[in-house]
Amino acid sequence: FDQMLDKLEHSFQKEKQFTSDASHELRTPVTVILSQCEYLLEEGNLSGEERKSVEAIQRKARNMARMISQLLLLSRADQGRQQVQKERLNLSELTQMIAEEQEILAREKEIQVLAEIQPDIYAQADESLYIRMLDNLISNAVNYGKKGGYVKVLLSEEENMVKGVVEDNGKGIPQESLPRIWERFYRVDTSRTDQEHSGLGLSMVKWIVQAHGGEITVESQEGQGSRFIFQIPED
């Protein structure tokens, strides 16, 4: 029995290492593809159809780069190698900045990003990880939002905890899918899911929140929207 457990543990470790190695090796070719796409688009000698083709390749390569980055973070987290470098941050200012950046992208879908942020909330947090976490939650809300809808980004302070909420009035999540949305590569409905999303984002979000000593939950009703609530300690 012990030997079987040892073999299983060895297999799991090999799988984690393979994921990490593969993600690392894939970054270079994807970077080359993106740089070549940018070069071709800047040249200006492309026909209309050629430009559309290169832009399609560029979009897919960007999606691949995002997925590789998420895989690398999760594989490092599995192996205990992903560092969390906390510093005292003004999360109010950082959250406002992220919301404003996402608002520019949301305009393409005619979705409003509304921020209600209590000023001067400070906490010990990893800046890059916090940005990735909130970026993902807001972009998901925009992606599953509806034309003319809204995404609310709320931040407040409650009993030495920082509470954040990302809420939308979009498609929502079926009740039977709610327990599984944190699983890697799980997508609620592949027939209507935007293929730009790999199904890794929420797994990454949950790990980042937990790495900060916090927790994240979701409330959703299909056809009415979703509400993601995270809490992390100030210290």
Image (cartoon, rainbow, N blue to C red):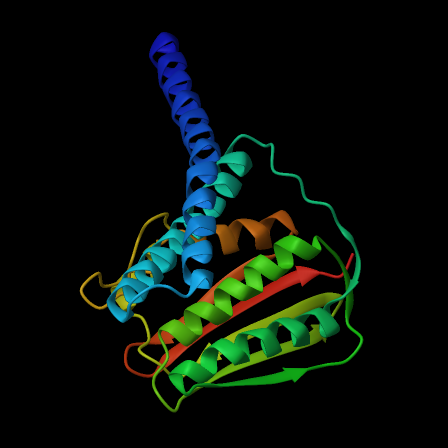
Q: Is residue 197 visible?
A: no
* Closer to the camera in the image, 26 or 129: 26
- The mark tally for this picture is 0
Q: Position of residue 80 (x, y in %)?
A: 58, 32
Quarter holding residue 145: bottom left
Give the residue displayed 47% in from the left and 37% down from the top: 28
The residue positioned 47% from the left and 50% from the top of the image is 35
102 or 150, which lies in front?
102
From the top left corner, tell me how far across and down residue 202 is, in percent. 44, 57
Q: Residue furthest bottom?
A: 148
Residue 109, percent from left and from top: 39, 82
Asked whether residue 166 is in view, the answer is yes
Q: Position of residue 24 (x, y in %)?
A: 48, 33
- From the viewer's perspective, tell me whether residue 232 is left or right of residue 200: right
Q: Is residue 40 above or below residue 24?
A: below
Where's the N terminus, which quadrant?
A: top left
Residue at 37% over, 47% down: 184
Task: Point out the residue furthest to the top here.
Answer: 3
Residue 132 figure quarter: bottom right
Which residue reaches farthest front?
45
**Vertical relation: 181 (above or below) 149:** above
Quadrant of the image containing the C terminus? bottom right
Q: Is residue 69 above or below residue 234?
A: above
